[in-house]
Image: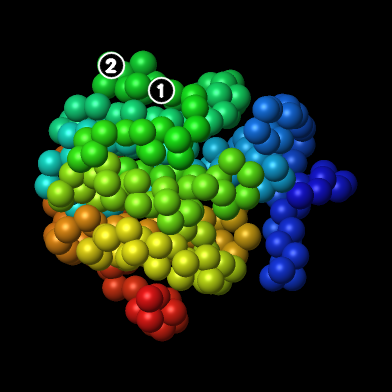
Amino acid sequence: MSANNGWVYETVEEMGARFGIRVTEKLLDEQTPYQHLEVWRTEHWGNLMLLDGVIMLSSLENFVYHEMMSHPALQTHAAPRNVVIIGGGDCGTLTEVLRHREVESVVQIDIDQAVTRAAERFFPELIARNDDPRVDLRFEDGVAWMRNAPAESADVIIVDSTDPIGPGTGLFGPDFLADCHRVLRADGIMVGQSESPFYHMPLMVDYHRAMKDAGFAERRSLLFPQPVYPGGSITGTLARKSGRLDEIRPLADEIETRYYSAALHRGLLDTPGFMREALDAV
């Protein structure tokens, strides 16, 4: 990442690409014990968060990512009572999960408390439900937490991770995914942030292979737009411990979404051909 003449740029050298956003003021610049955390005020996108120079979210469009990292998994599970979120320190995914009345408990484990503190200051809409009595916020290593979690203790696991660099590296590994499979109940579902097929197809293939090797019965990568990420899109990969992923419950009337719908969800299960070519070979 670089800042130059009022712009913040994220560069992806291996793809020969650069994405930029015009900024007006740096609001936070902190080297945490784990990563470099920045928040900028922008001209059009509201506030903008970066970790280690990689754009994480903006005020304008984060709802797309947070809805897609929560509702597809919850609407596929018949009765998602106990939810675990690994990562997700900005708490936007947590907020979406808590819209579901059937959810009885949510444990969120993020290694870097500074990210949550920054969200409290600069993205208050994302932490509005953090005092919900169903929430258990923990600031520790998510890989270690999952390794020690009881078997068959969760209905849904959401891995809301950064890119596979720094603290997020272990969340893409086969040992972690095997632990997720063990911790899920028999009908459990997990979803993990799985990068862009345009920029990171080899990583997606490895992710699917690790899920298959862990024992997951079916996997689908849902492709959706993410305007502030280089490439403009990202995927969340759903995996079910047993059974299929095409049974989708209608969204409860009281849950208002700005991007997700059951109809959109069904359409996204029809994986684009260029992705199938790579992923079906796993």
Q: Residues within 10 Å of mark 1 (few under 14, many from 20)?
A: some
Q: Position of residue 228 (x, y in %)?
A: 59, 52
Q: Give left or right: position of 79 versus 133.
A: left
- Residue that mark 2 sits on: 133
Q: Give left or right: position of 224 versus 19.
A: left
- Residue that mark 1 sits on: 137
Q: Nearer the viewer, residue 16 or 4?
A: 16
Amino acid on which disc 2 is placed: Pro
Q: Give left or right: position of 239 versus 53.
A: left
Q: Secondary structure at mark 2?
A: loop
Examine the rendering and report whether any part of residue 44 can be seen: no
Q: Position of residue 211 (x, y in %)?
A: 35, 61
Q: Nearer the viewer, residue 80 or 118?
A: 80
Q: Position of residue 83 (x, y in %)?
A: 27, 36
Q: Nearer the viewer, residue 183 or 264?
A: 183
Q: Quadrant of residue 82?
A: top left
Q: Position of residue 123 (x, y in %)?
A: 54, 28
Q: Secondary structure at mark 1?
A: strand
Residue lying at 38% horizontally and 76% vertically, measured from the top left: 282
Q: CA distance from mark 2 to mark 1?
A: 11 Å
Residue lying at 63% horizontally and 38% vertically, measured from the top left: 49
